[in-house]
Image (tube, rainbow, N blue to C red):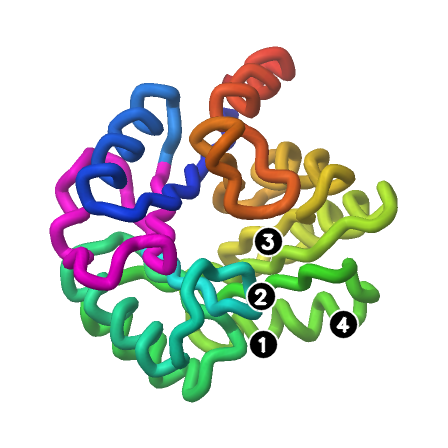
Amino acid sequence: MKPKIAVSIPACTISEASRMVRKASRLGADLAEIRLDYLKREEPVEKIVGTGTMPLIATFRSSNNGGAQNLKGTERVETLIAAAEAGFDYVDIEVETRNLTAVINKLRNAGAKTIASHHDFTRTASDIKLKRVLQLCRSSGATLSKLVTTVRRLEDNLRLLALTREASRRGGVICFGMGALGVQSRIYSPIYGAAFTFASLDDGRSVAPGQIPLSRMRRIYAEMGCS
């Protein structure tokens, strides 16, 4: 199997985003995550659609979840709905969003697949709590459930991968750990059933702790015989 990789694109302008998407495609990415919180406010999101042949994910992180802008939740939601209407293939919506199910219905009606996401920047919670969060994501009606934690012990990777394997049998899931110790789960998660994993375009453009460059991840997969 060839694991799927989404590359995070933290561009400030449409032209920069277009260049980065094209480069990601050349390097073997399967999807491009456009981080709209990095994009200048005056830049129209609809101009990003059609810049390449890869599926595009629209993501607008809140400041509490590592976002580059501190905007109200309503403004983020409006931007994401505009992205769905413009033709983005996926829209990532944080599970903490108010009226989550209603927002997901609007995104679906606009033509986008949805990702209900939860990020924990401090730890990897107990298995019971992780499963509760995963169920919360699933109950929203999203296409994919995304659960990302911070790995504090190597054993956390094993728990996340076990959860990925179990959860992938019952629906689409993205699950791995952040931080230097979480790189293992980033790499192995699609092998254990995750829809895809995430990488940076290069060393200087990581948007999350432990995110490694696409080219390095592809080399690792090639050495593992997964290419």
- Amino acid, disc 2: His
In the rendered image, residue 30, in percent from the top left (x then y), is placed at: 37, 33
The CA distance from mark 4 to mark 2 is: 12 Å
- Give the numbered dot on residue 129: 4
How many marks can you see?
Answer: 4
Whether the magenta-drawn stretch holds residue 41 is answered as: yes
From the viewer's perspective, is the residue at label 4 or at label 3 nearer? Answer: 4
**Residue closest to the eye, 138 or 211:** 211
Write down the quadrant of residue 157 in the picture.
top right
Q: Is mark 2 on a helix, strand or loop?
A: strand
Which residue sits at x=77%, y=39%? 181
Question: Which is closer to the viewer, label 1 or label 3?
Answer: 1
Q: Is 6 contained in the magenta span?
A: no
Name the disc covering residue 136, or none. Answer: 1
Q: Mark 2 points at which residue?
A: 118
Q: On the image, numbered disc 3 is attached to which residue?
A: 169
* Among the 4 quarters of the image, the one containing residue 109: bottom left
Cα distance between the residues tagged 1 and 2:
10 Å
Q: Mark 4 or mark 3: which comes first in sequence?
A: 4
Q: Kindly report which numbered mark, 4 or 2, lies closer to the viewer in this rendering.
A: 2
Is residue 119 visible in the rendered image? The answer is yes
Q: Is residue 111 visible?
A: no
Decide whether the magenta segment is chiefly helix, strand or loop.
loop
Is the residue marked by circle 4 packed among few (<14), some (14-19), or many (20+) residues within 10 Å? few
Where is residue 225? Give x, y as percent. 59, 14
Q: Which mark is residue 12?
A: none
Q: Looking at the image, tell me whether mark 1 or mark 3 is earlier in sequence order.
A: 1
